[in-house]
Image (tube, coloured by chain):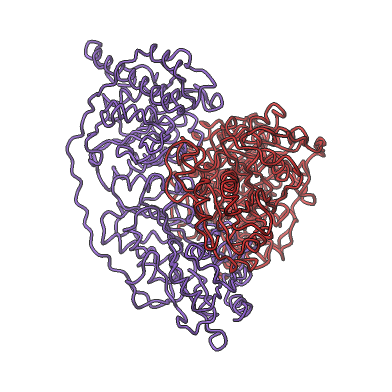
Chain colours: A purple, B red
């Protein structure tokens, strides 16, 4: 690239230096006021972000939801002082608010969260901001065809997270020219030097090998930064700015010093630091606004669900429901981790190929991309085997902190998958997904129900999860299909005051419970409750069942005993003050490590088949 | 390297081809007998493994626990037909057993597990075998100084998992010349072509950039494979054999064909395939045994625990207990994910620097390395912030299937961490760890207790987990310190028939409960139970508390309401048939998304401080 002459660039460079000075001062001021935080990790990136703010970002701070705005994600979320100083410099927050950093009730939390409207997602678990930024860029490239550029600032310590390389791999593979990562290579991690320290060539080689264009620069040279950002905006490939920086830059007693990670300066130290930096009253600097752009209006109709009469696997119904949804709603996008012919997410592909994203076997990146896509208003569904969603648990819990609206589907859940064995079984997914703040956990037993639950997920806030089954299951529901609701349940056998025992089941075990009810119908009338909404669970129906049966309850689930349906039922009854009314309770769950076998054999070996439900019912006191 | 003359190598190459033919035939035979499995993914790697078996592996099949044996891990666990065919070819299992593949009760599960003594770890969740192999190699290099070489066979689809690159990064950084990965690049994944297909140069560039030596070969050329393995054994860096292969190789109608992933051939197809391969009765082929080697005897004494009198954080006590353990036991190794000055695992380092492993910020690799190290008899403790263990959940659940004995520590758990905010809080870790099969979940409230629990973990089988707290906590225990046990609890206030309400707490909330008990001592006598063993929980103590108080129970925990202590308590009472005796129950847990603030402020804002326990006790019926 041609370099501008010194005369042209001098005032611009002076402006950048002024902003960087203010960002440094404010990073120190707010963390010292808080008594904690990461000033030194902020100082290393002050020049990079100053140049971005005033020279390259296109963002209307008064309209953070403008779809034309660029996106800037601090993957190094601990550099929140810098992130907030940037908001202050842009005039988005006041200096007064800046000084509320890390205090109870402040929007300026220890790590950034979308409680602030200019923050897209929560960061603070390293290695996540970059993969999420890839998702935003992917959505921008297709299906939105949006003009925005996505910038993400990473630390160097986080570059050892595999998720970073999943992200760059996808950026490279998809040719995301609208994506730029800025590696702030300040050499020092939390407890000492990073693995690669200042070996910029090693970083650049990795970046190239993963299909992105590395731009190696001195991260404190404003002119070099300026050129690199210009190149990044115009490149035809995703770019990574590999910037050599100094931790604590700008303050002599902090620069490149160990022992300063995550430590605020005390008042005396801060005074000295601010004197070195040249503290000036905070002021506001202009950012270029994006060119006006209005996204194409996305049509939304009521989906036309297929009606099933013959046994079909709920995973298949999931795929077909996605297809129906994709036809009805242009904002729905689908991601899958290279198993779409198993999860049946592939059924969506012919309907809307530009809204189907093959994420290959990279579950972390898949969830991160879903989080990124909902940032820009899309309605993502991401699917893989339920077992492999455990790979992305950190991303899922962080998605809740991001207040993200994403929908996950886990297929092949439970011992009922059969021969593949325990590595594929997901006997912990309900526990994992229940323990996500504000989550919705659904587990259908029938294809018609599955379609309706998928429809409910599309309109649901927060993290919602649907657990599907590998095997074909009989159709239980052909009527009142619009009656399924989040927080609901259905009584599929019994339902009168004559019921002697209630069986709470979900998914595959509903069918076992129905078989047990048939077998016991003349001796012990069972009420079979299909608790398809595991969270929130239908507390009223549970309390009612306890009362109707004189307190005799069985829970049967294809899951470990911990954290799943059994815990959900007891917790709901306890919350409702009805747990004391239990006179007999049995919890059938998978208690030994399963092996391989046929689905029916494994259900039986695990003690969760109809036969065991019959035994449990007969064993309850007074039943 | 000089290539051997044709005359020398011809008989050897013929032998390799014979073995490969048998491996192909057996892979088809066993999967066809099972009616499921992955024959085509086995066929692509048959030549690679044939050459390894007869030409390069050093393994005494009659002594799978021989510490001098090489290790071979199928990271592509779905190629289990090949893995089992290899065992058959080595004479480790009979042909009869081979044909039990995937049947109920067979040791030959759908994916390999250590139910078979020649299998080190369970695989089947892709991207895990390689990082575990890195752990075995790391242990071999130091501290064992063992002669073994570690080989791992990966598929190409799994190379998009970030964990693969975490593994190679560590192999490169640690210079693991005893490590070789074999990339079986057969171009086809489950649902179609892989991301990079046959772009061997791209793979080689990534391997080089991550510090390993790539050896690019035709994976069906026995001579080339032979040379590559020889080079791998003698290289001074970790090696990766990037082998171009053909999925379904050796059977014309399977070769490089889509639609055959994970499908067994039917009887007719199998007959045709076997005719093409040239089926011969299975026979046994010799493997070179390793040179005799006896590891240095590792001393074990009783650890000398520090006794604490003043408030200290349990994370600090954890670090000091590790140090004491490291001094007493030479088999203990410690791993940390770049936060050892926060988890305090760093205290172990001066005691035994050769047994401390800095895993940088790569939690998946950290857990994988721990699993690898226990394969070779070491006693690993791995620590990071509790929140970031969620990153490794898939590895932890797989470790349980591996029947691994590993110990995990999660620090900074709960809202009581204060200013850092929810991304660092781990409000789901108890749910996650309880839902691991056979796990032990410990949560100390005091430094002396912490040390004793760390001691118990060292001798514990399975996956054990200790949750530690950031803040200093008062010392509650100075007596009967040897009385702490897995499955135990302590009554710290009350304990008589006069108790009106029982409060079950653990960790930080024990101290809040104690404060509440002090406050209520003249009005509502509280029994405060320190449930430091969350799993297994002390059911007897809970039942006793319910009976003593006439059924009045409060559970208070610094965790989301789902899957943690509250669920554990209710489940235990239900299991014991005592849940019906509850007349009043309150569950205090974190129910809203926290922000930043001081620890005491956040405990109070979450409704789990002493004040809220007092209110809850006063609100119970009849209290």
The x, y position of residue A452, in whole percent, is 35, 67
The x, y position of residue A294, in whole percent, is 18, 44
Q: Is residue B398 above or below residue B101?
A: above
Q: Is residue B469 above or below residue A451?
A: above
Q: A481 or A531: nearer the eye?
A: A531
Does the image show residue B275?
no
Quadrant the C terminus of chain A occupies: bottom right
The x, y position of residue B1, in whole percent, is 63, 30
Residue projecting furthest to the bottom: A522
Q: A314 or A524: nearer the eye?
A: A524
Quadrant in which residue A128 is drawn: top left
Report how many numbered discs are placed on residues in the image: 0
Quadrant the N terminus of chain A occupies: top left
Does the image show residue B149?
yes
The x, y position of residue A210, in whole percent, is 44, 36
Q: Is residue A554 above or below residue B260?
A: below
Q: Is residue A550 left or right of residue A438?
A: right
Q: A554 or B482: nearer the eye?
A: B482
Q: Is residue B407 left or right of residue A25?
A: right
Q: Is residue A451 above or below residue B556?
A: below
């Amino acid at each position: 690239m041609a370099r501008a002459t010194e005369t042209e660039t001098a005032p611009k460079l002076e402006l950048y230096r002024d902003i960087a000075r203010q960002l440094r001062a404010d990073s120190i001021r707010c963390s010292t006021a808080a008594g904690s935080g990461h000033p030194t990790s902020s100082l290393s990136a002050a020049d990079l972000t100053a140049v971005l703010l005033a020279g390259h970002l296109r963002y209307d701070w008064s309209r953070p939801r403008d779809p034309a705005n660029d996106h800037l994600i601090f993957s190094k979320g601990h550099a929140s002082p810098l992130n907030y100083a940037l908001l202050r410099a842009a005039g988005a927050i006041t200096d007064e608010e800046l000084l509320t950093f890390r205090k109870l009730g402040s929007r300026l939390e220890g790590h950034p969260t979308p409680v602030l409207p200019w923050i897209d997602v929560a960061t603070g678990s390293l290695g996540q901001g970059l993969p999420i930024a890839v998702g935003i860029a992917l959505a921008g490239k297709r299906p939105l065809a949006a003009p925005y550029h996505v910038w993400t600032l990473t630390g160097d310590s986080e570059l050892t997270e595999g998720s970073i390389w999943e992200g760059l791999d996808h950026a490279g593979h998809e040719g995301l020219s609208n994506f730029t990562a800025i590696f702030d290579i300040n050499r020092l991690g939390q407890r000492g030097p990073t693995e690669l320290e200042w070996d910029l060539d090693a970083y650049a080689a990795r970046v190239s090998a993963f299909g992105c264009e590395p731009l190696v620069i001195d991260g404190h040279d404003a002119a070099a930064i300026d050129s690199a950002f210009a190149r990044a905006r115009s490149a035809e490939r995703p770019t990574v700015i590999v910037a050599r920086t100094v931790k604590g830059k700008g303050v002599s007693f902090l620069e490149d010093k160990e022992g300063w990670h995550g430590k605020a300066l005390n008042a005396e130290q801060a005074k000295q630091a601010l004197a070195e930096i040249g503290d000036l009253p905070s002021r506001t600097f202009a950012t270029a606004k994006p060119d006006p752009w209005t996204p194409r209006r996305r049509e939304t109709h009521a989906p036309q669900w297929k009606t099933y009469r013959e046994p079909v696997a709920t995973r298949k119904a999931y795929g077909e429901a996605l297809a129906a949804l994709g036809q009805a709603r242009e904002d729905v996008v689908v991601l899958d981790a290279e198993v779409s012919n198993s999860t049946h997410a592939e059924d969506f592909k012919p309907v809307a190929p530009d809204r189907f994203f093959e994420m290959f076997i990279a579950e972390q990146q898949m969830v991160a991309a879903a989080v990124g896509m909902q940032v820009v208003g899309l309605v993502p569904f991401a699917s893989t085997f339920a077992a492999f969603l455990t790979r992305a648990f950190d991303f899922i819990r962080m998605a809740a902190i991001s207040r993200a609206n994403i929908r996950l589907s886990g297929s092949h859940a439970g011992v009922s998958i059969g021969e593949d064995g325990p590595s594929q079984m997901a006997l912990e997914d309900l526990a994992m997904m229940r323990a996500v703040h504000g989550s919705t956990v659904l587990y259908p037993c029938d294809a018609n129900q599955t379609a309706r639950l998928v429809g409910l997920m599309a309109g649901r806030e927060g993290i919602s999860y649907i657990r599907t089954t590998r095997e074909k299951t009989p159709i239980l529901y052909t009527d009142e299909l619009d009656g399924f609701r989040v927080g609901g349940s259905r009584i599929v056998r019994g339902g009168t005051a004559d019921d002697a025992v209630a069986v709470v089941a979900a998914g595959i075990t509903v069918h076992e419970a129905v078989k047990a009810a048939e077998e016991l119908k003349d001796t012990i009338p069972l009420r079979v409750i299909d608790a398809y909404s595991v969270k929130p669970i239908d507390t009223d129906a549970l309390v009612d069942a306890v009362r109707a049966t004189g307190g005799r309850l069985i829970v049967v689930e294809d899951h470990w005993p911990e954290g799943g349906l059994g815990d959900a039922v007891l917790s709901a009854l306890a919350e409702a003050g009805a747990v004391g009314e239990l006179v007999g309770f049995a919890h059938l769950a998978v208690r030994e490590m399963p092996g391989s076998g046929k689905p029916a054999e494994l259900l039986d070996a695990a003690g969760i088949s109809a036969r065991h439900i019959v035994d449990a019912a007969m064993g309850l006191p007074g039943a």
